[in-house]
Structures are given as C-alpha cells and as structure tokens.
Image: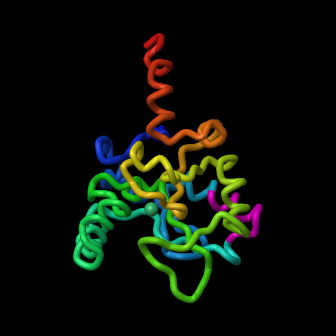
Amino acid sequence: MRDYLMLINRESAPVAHVPGEREQLVPVGGTGVLLERQAAYALELLMERIDGWNRIVPVSGWRSGEEQRRIWDESLRENGMEFTKTYVALPGHSEHESGLAIDLGLKKETIDFIRPDFPYDGICGTFRECAPDYGFIERYPGGKEAVTGIGHEPWHFRYIGTPHARILTDAGLTLEEYTAYRMPERGRGA
Ligand SMILES: [Zn+2]
C-alpha cells in the first residue's frame, strides 16, 4: 500500500515518482491532468459534491521528473532564482512527481500555470471547507513558509487520505509538523 502521508520537501524526497507507477495514474476533471488513482477518485467525489468542475480547473497534477526540471529551468529564466525557489520545488523534490498533488485554478480566460488564482471565498472557499473530509490538505499555507520551505500557495493541494487530512487541518499543522508529531507513535511496538 502507498504511504499517503509520505513527506516530500527540500530535505526529504522518498520519491514516489517511481517509473512503473504510471499505470496508477488517472485523468481528472475530464482533462489530461493526471493524479494517482486513489487521490483522483477522492477528488472526483469531492468535486461532484460541490459541483466544482463547473468553476474550477485542474491546472497541474502529476509531473515526470523531466517535466519538473523543465518547469524549474523555465521559471529560472523567466522569473529568477528568488521567485523560483519560492514557488517551484526542486526537480526530484516536488509533490507533483508523486501524483498526490494538484494545483487548482478558478476557471477563467487566462490561467497562470505557476500561480493560478484560487481564492478563499466562493466555490474555492467551499472546496477548502470540504477538501479535508476527502483527504486533501492545503499544503503550503501562509505563515508556515519557514516550515515547508515553499511560499504561500493557495492553489496547491496534497492528498494524504482520511482521517489525517481533517485532523491536520483542524490542528492547523503542516505535513512537516504532523508527520514529526506522529513519528514516536509509528516507532512504538515496532
Ligand atoms: Zn503545485
């Protein structure tokens, strides 16, 4: 079974983007955006409940290591190092490479691929309220940049499963904090 709580960040990259897992990826929202099977299923259920796909688009899901590298290089050229380090994970260290992360954007004519608009009210607010019950967390909240190593990204959601997503969200924790907190429990009786 997959470790849906797996921590993927600058320090830790167990990475799940193991070749051969590609068959575990399925498209979401009637687009070509791919997610890991269970994460995709949970997202579709959530979107169905809130009628989300009418107003929300999947902007970026699973990325290959090469794609992450291309996005990093491109952003570096266009936006410089400071911006890139803040909003783009290092190749090999992106949650997108695991198929467990999705960037969502409010449906409109032009969508910023790196920083899509996903506000805290309206349909996006409704999505945020319901997401933890379907296993999704807002992965890079504001005020936690020093913990996550990534800037505030209101559009990036990570699948960690239930009931973890709800517990983590209600406790106001990041995945870094949540997994560190759970570690002793994991070791018990091993
Ligand atoms: Zn993202």
| Identity of the residue drawn at 43% across and 40% down | 6
Whether 5 is drawn above or below 189: the answer is below
Residue 83, given in percent of the width and then of the height, sits at 32, 67
| Identity of the residue drawn at 35% across and 55% down | 94
Residue 168, given in percent of the width and then of the height, sits at 59, 38
Q: What's the image's color scheme? A: rainbow
| Identity of the residue drawn at 27% across and 67% down | 72
Name the residue nearer the viewer: 78 or 100: 78
Q: Quadrant of residue 79?
A: bottom left
Please identify the quadrant where the C terminus is shown.
top left
Q: Which secondary structure type mostly characterizes the magenta part of the structure? A: helix
The number of callouts visible is: 0
Residue 97, given in percent of the width and then of the height, sits at 37, 57
What range is drawn magenta here? 43-52
- Among all residues in the image, which is located at the extreme bottom? 109
Residue 80 among those drawn in magenta:
no
Q: Quadrant of residue 161?
A: top right
| Identity of the residue drawn at 70% across and 66% down | 121
Q: With 69 as the anchor, is 165 left or right in this view?
A: right
